[in-house]
């Protein structure tokens, strides 16, 4: 471009902006200048730095022709477009001035020069990463799996842009576009090929190829379904295993969905096991002893019996833990506790305990409930008791999901107080244990061993005073009456019931006096099975664990999937009972997810499974150390202390389990028995045959040992039962003290007893140990004729003497048959043998007599003779024994008869009932 400079002022023309385009590496540019004064010349140009810093450092201007003012702008060093694509600076021209020294030289105004550097394609593309990896689920087409990217260092758009990419690996199911996006051209199959590897190249718009190709690796994942992976529907638990993880390999798959909160609820259903869960199988009294509870409780719903007949009209239901369950229908099922029981329950300090289940199975619905009036108050216990000089009243009732205790410390003066609790356990139709400790004005409620404080306390001063009359109802309350009515046979037929209870009750007891400590209540009624968490120290950050009091529901909450998966695998089931109740416990896992995008957040379905508690190894309770026979002189049984029946009794409890004999080179399987320390809860001694005669015989027990150990005993003529949970050694001591005593003159030949023991409320029983007691009599009494005759009649006619000599009967196929003693059998055999010898002697005499008269009798007498060389004589020993006392006299009479009437030998032989068999041609037996 031309640059004009005025001669006088050395000013540039109005066009003072010059744009120069210089190729990289070029240095020259012509700039014309003009001096309009005619004799002026342009002596030079001066370069000034511009805004970008370019100027005198990088560029210079030289004069080519002073007269014409042409000049040259050139760069002092090579230009680089990649470093700086454009340069901007100013230039100023000046003339030669006056005189040889060039004084008074004039300068032009400044002109701006823009220099744009043209690019050349000197760089090749470079990939940002040398290796690209991606994972995709199988069976789907994706618009973009991964994006590769390459860069070019050239400065111009022509050479710096990547014009296209290309996959250079042949035969791959992928394609790439000009932006570097890779997609699959067909659905991928992880089973056919799990990993795909291929190479990609890139070109810029100047057709320069990338220096190095990029590698792409695509991993095909199996089809992703959001949910829990590794769920096992059936989980087995072996009793005695302690805590066992329920989900050892379970983990949550969200298919890369971003979640910020996870909550999982594990529910174990044990409502069908006993009363809500697996608890100790011993009786309530035994459990109280094992937990160290204070004694003195009164059973308000005892088993029906002549002494406790107020529960006989109530229907009962079977229970898996052998306890008695009473059913109440809300109308006419009411138990009226007699005054003799209520009298001992006075005072304002007492503990009321019961098992409750609202709306139990097989309970008929009352008419009022059928009409939908299910919100009425249902009274469980209603009682008015007499204190020293006043009457107090209380009632325990349920109303919806509320439990209330109405307490009136003095019905004649004090104002009533109502304690109220709102509990889900009251209305969930499951078994729960309630323990109410009253130390007025303080009241403590335990539900399944957990303490609950009253929600509200009402002052019910407007309620009319109850009648000062002692009585107690279970299952309802009495309607206020204007005039007192008399109680006949522990029933009030004309009384009207209000607030009938609809459900099941069991174990309703009241114990006056001090209340139970919390530790005892927890021991008595806490579940022995439930959900637990393995190790809280391994719980990740942000994780929370919640467990309900009954340990049937466990809730996990967190925000990190990895930590959450580790926590789920720590959820365990524990059962502290050695002999856990076998059966199925349903399991449920409910999961709730919260995502940043609520609309597309995952929804997981509820998982259901079940826990199977296997049958525990049954304990073998072995009774030994007692022989089958116990023989003692009869006077010892008639002593004041009698004779101990089981002086050397040994009780051993063992567990049998399978042993792997294959590892020991043995064929088949084997059982190994391990002795264990154990607890029994009952033993029974029962006489076999007829019951004991209370006037002549009895069983004695050391009552000091029984009371010291807190055991209970029932001693009747049919059996003696010792009950209560205690160790084996205690039961051995008690049973060794059992003695058998006879009254004077009641000696007999033998008596048999059977001993058996059990545990876990009769769930496991021992072997039956049978003992035969023999009474040794003196020889004088045994051989006395009258004594023998009396013994004979006893054995032949036991029904006539059953009251005096029970058990002395002939062997019979019945279960409780009794056989004669060993001494009696020996005596009978000896006497029978003696009778046979006498009979043989008589027949020998008769035979000799017949031969003597054979010569005189002729042929007729000879035809009656027979050969006795092969005789077989069969004798009924009992018939011989029956007639042994009169046999000698009969034999002598036969001899005399024979002398007087020798022609009638058959009459005597018929009386003896001797069967003679002759071996020969005629083998038929003959009777003589």
Image (spheres, rainbow, N blue to C red):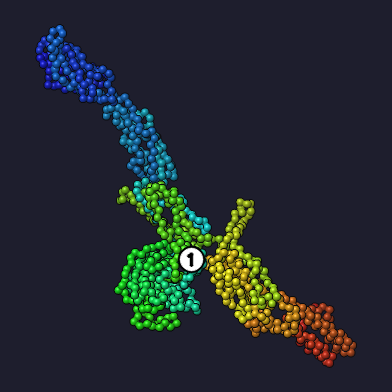
Residue 263 visible, this angle: yes
Say if 681 sits above or below 609 in the image.
below
Question: Quadrant where the C terminus lies?
Answer: bottom right
The answer to which of 278 and 662 lies nearer the viewer is 278
Residue at 21% across, 21% down: 49
Q: Is 104 left, or right, of 821 in this rendering? A: left
Say if 64 sits above or below 54 in the image.
above
Residue 354 visible, this angle: no
Say if 630 sits above or below 137 in the image.
below
Name the residue that disc number 1 marks: 293
Q: Residue furthest front?
A: 389
Q: Is 137 left, or right, of 20 in this rendering? A: right
- SS for tag 1? loop
The answer to which of 35 and 465 lies nearer the viewer is 465
Q: Residue furthest bottom?
A: 900
Residue at 66% across, 77% down: 638
Residue at 26% across, 17% down: 76
Q: Position of residue 398 (x, y in %)?
A: 36, 69
Q: Is 385 left, or right, of 17 in this rendering? A: right
Q: Residue 97's image quarter? A: top left
Q: Is 786 left, or right, of 596 in this rendering? A: right
Q: Residue furthest right?
A: 855
The answer to which of 106 and 44 lies nearer the viewer is 106
Q: Position of residue 828 (x, y in %)?
A: 74, 79
Q: Residue 443's image quarter? A: bottom left
Q: Residue furthest top?
A: 100
Residue at 82% across, 78% down: 870
Question: Quadrant where the N terminus lies?
Answer: top left
Disc 1: CA contacts within 10 A as few (<14), some (14-19) or many (>=20): some
How many numbered marks have been drawn onto this rendered protein structure?
Answer: 1
Q: Position of residue 242 (x, y in %)?
A: 50, 56
């Amino acid at each position: 471009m031309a640059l004009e400079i005025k001669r006088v002022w050395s000013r540039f023309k109005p066009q003072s902006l010059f744009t120069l385009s210089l190729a990289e590496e070029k240095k020259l540019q012509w700039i014309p200048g003009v001096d309009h004064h005619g004799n002026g010349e342009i002596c030079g140009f001066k370069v000034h730095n511009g805004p970008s810093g370019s100027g005198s450092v990088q560029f210079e201007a030289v004069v080519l022709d002073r007269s014409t003012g042409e000049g040259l702008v050139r760069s002092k060093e090579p230009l680089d477009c990649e470093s700086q694509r454009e340069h901007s600076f100013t230039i100023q021209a000046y003339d030669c001035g006056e005189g040889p020294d060039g004084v008074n030289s004039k300068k032009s105004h400044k002109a701006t020069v823009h220099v744009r550097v043209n690019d050349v394609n000197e760089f090749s593309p470079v990939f940002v990463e040398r290796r690209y990896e991606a994972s995709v689920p199988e069976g789907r087409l994706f618009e973009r799996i991964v994006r590769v990217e390459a860069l070019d260092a050239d400065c111009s758009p022509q050479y710096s842009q990547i014009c296209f990419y290309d996959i250079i690996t042949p035969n791959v199911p992928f394609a790439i576009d000009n932006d570097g996006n890779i997609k699959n051209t067909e659905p991928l199959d992880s089973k056919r090929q799990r990993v795909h590897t291929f190479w990609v190249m890139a070109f810029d718009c100047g057709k320069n190829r990338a220096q190095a190709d990029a590698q792409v690796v695509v991993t095909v994942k199996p089809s992703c379904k959001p949910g829990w992976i590794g769920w096992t529907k059936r989980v087995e638990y072996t009793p005695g295993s302690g805590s066992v993880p329920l989900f050892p390999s379970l983990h949550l798959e969200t298919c890369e969905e971003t979640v910020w909160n996870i909550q999982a609820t594990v529910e174990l259903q044990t409502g069908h096991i006993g009363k809500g869960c697996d608890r100790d199988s011993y009786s309530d009294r035994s459990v109280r002893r094992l937990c160290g509870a204070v004694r003195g409780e009164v059973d308000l719903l005892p088993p029906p019996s002549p002494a406790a007949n107020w529960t006989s009209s109530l229907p009962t239901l079977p229970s898996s833990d052998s306890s008695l369950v009473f059913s109440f229908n809300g109308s006419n099922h009411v138990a009226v506790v007699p005054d003799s029981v209520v009298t001992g329950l006075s005072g304002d300090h007492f503990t009321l305990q019961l098992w409750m289940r609202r709306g139990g199975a097989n309970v008929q619905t009352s008419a009022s409930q059928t009409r939908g009036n299910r919100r009425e108050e249902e009274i469980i216990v209603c009682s008015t008791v007499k204190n020293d000089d006043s009457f107090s009243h209380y009632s325990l009732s349920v109303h919806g999901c509320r439990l209330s205790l109405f307490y009136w410390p003095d019905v004649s003066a004090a104002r009533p107080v109502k304690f109220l609790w709102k509990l889900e356990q009251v209305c969930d139709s499951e078994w729960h244990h309630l323990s109410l400790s009253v130390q007025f004005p303080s009241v403590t409620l335990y539900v399944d061993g957990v303490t609950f404080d009253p929600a509200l306390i009402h002052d019910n001063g407007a309620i009319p005073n109850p009648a000062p009359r002692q009585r107690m109802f279970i299952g309802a309350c009495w309607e206020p009456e204007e005039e007192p009515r008399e109680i006949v046979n522990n029933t009030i037929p004309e009384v009207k019931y209000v607030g009938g209870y609809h459900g099941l009750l069991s174990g309703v007891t009241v114990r006056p006096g001090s209340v139970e400590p919390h530790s005892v209540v927890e021991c008595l009624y806490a579940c022995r099975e439930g959900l637990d968490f393995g190790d809280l120290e391994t719980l990740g950050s942000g994780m929370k664990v919640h467990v309900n009091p009954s340990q049937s529901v466990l809730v996990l909450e967190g925000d990190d999937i990895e930590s959450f998966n580790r926590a789920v695998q720590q959820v365990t089931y524990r059962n502290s009972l050695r002999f856990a109740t076998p059966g199925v416990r349903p399991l449920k896992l409910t999961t709730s997810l919260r995502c940043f995008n609520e609309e597309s957040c995952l929804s997981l379905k509820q998982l259901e499974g079940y826990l199977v508690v296997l049958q525990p190894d049954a304990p073998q309770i072995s009774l030994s150390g007692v022989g089958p026979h116990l023989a003692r002189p009869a006077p010892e049984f008639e002593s004041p202390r009698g004779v101990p029946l089981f002086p050397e009794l040994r009780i051993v409890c063992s567990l049998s389990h399978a042993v792997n004999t294959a590892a020991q080179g043995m064929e088949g399987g084997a059982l190994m028995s391990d002795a264990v320390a154990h607890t029994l809860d009952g033993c029974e001694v029962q006489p076999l045959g007829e019951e004991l005669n209370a006037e002549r015989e009895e069983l004695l027990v050391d009552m000091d040992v029984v009371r010291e150990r807190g055991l209970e005993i029932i001693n009747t003529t049919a059996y003696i039962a010792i009950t209560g949970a205690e160790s084996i050694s205690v039961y051995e001591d008690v049973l060794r003290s059992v003695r058998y005593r006879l009254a004077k003159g009641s000696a007999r030949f033998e008596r048999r007893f059977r001993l058996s023991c059990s545990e876990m409320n009769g769930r496991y029983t021992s072997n039956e140990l049978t003992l035969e007691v023999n009474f040794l009599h003196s020889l004088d009494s045994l051989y006395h004729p009258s004594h023998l005759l009396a013994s004979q009649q006893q054995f032949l006619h036991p029904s006539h003497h059953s009251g005096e000599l029970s058990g002395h009967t002939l062997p019979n196929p019945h279960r409780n048959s009794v056989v004669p003693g060993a001494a009696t059998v020996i005596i009978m055999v000896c006497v029978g043998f003696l009778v046979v010898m006498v009979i043989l002697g008589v027949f020998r005499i008769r035979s000799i007599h017949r031969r003597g008269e054979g010569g005189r009798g002729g042929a007729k007498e000879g035809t009656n003779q027979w050969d006795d060389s092969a005789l077989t004589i069969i004798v009924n020993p009992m018939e011989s024994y029956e007639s042994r006392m009169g046999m000698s006299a009969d034999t002598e009479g036969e001899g005399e008869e024979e002398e007087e009437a020798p022609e009638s030998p058959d009459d005597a032989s018929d009386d003896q009932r001797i069967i003679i068999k002759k071996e020969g041609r005629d083998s038929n037996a003959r009777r003589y």
